[in-house]
Image (tube, helix red, strand yellow):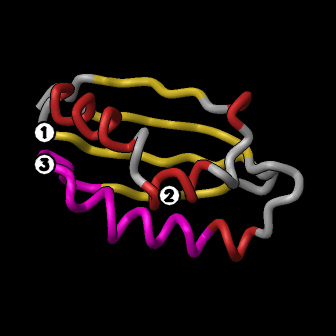
Amino acid sequence: MIEITTFRLTTATDEDAFRAADKRLQSDFAYRQAGLLRRTTARNDQGDWIVIDLWRTAGDADASGARRIDDPVATRFMSFVDATTVHTERYDTLD
């Protein structure tokens, strides 16, 4: 299952600080979640960000999302994100 999340950073966000928070989220939270196969973050020239997660199952993604709510590393990551711009979509892989 592929989960794609797009967002913009808050206007006050220092990009270097966000990238450090993203790196920490990846190492200290994301890759410790059962079923996460791959995660990558990217940005375009207009300031839009995307995180692409490949999950073994939608249930694994759901469980991680529930744990993320109270996790301090995830909370720090989200403190840089403009919550009004977050959009998540899921796709079932065909292979």
The residues colored magenta run: 19-38
Please identify the dominant SS of the magenta region: helix
In the image, residue 62 above or below residue 28: above
Image x and y of residue 68, in percent: 38, 43
Specify the quadrant of the image occupied by residue 86.
Answer: top right
Considering depth in this image, is 64 or 45 the residue closer to the camera? 64
Looking at marks 3 and 1 on the same chain, the residue that comes earlier in the sequence is marked by 3
Q: Which residue is mark 1?
A: 56
Label 3: how many Cα within 10 Å (few below 14, some 14–19, many 20+) = some
> In what quadrant of the picture does the N terminus appear?
top left
Q: Which residue is mark 3?
A: 34
Q: Which residue is mark 2?
A: 41
Q: Are marks 2 and 1 in contact (CB under 8 Å)?
A: no
- Amino acid type at circle 1 is Arg
- Amino acid type at circle 3 is Ala
Image x and y of residue 49, in percent: 64, 49
Label 2: how many Cα within 10 Å (few below 14, some 14–19, many 20+) = some
Q: Are marks 2 and 3 in contact (CB under 8 Å)?
A: no
64 magenta-colored: no
Q: Is residue 74 left or right of residue 36?
A: right
Considering depth in this image, is 93 or 36 the residue closer to the camera? 36
Labels 3, 1: front one: 3
In the image, residue 41 above or below residue 16: above
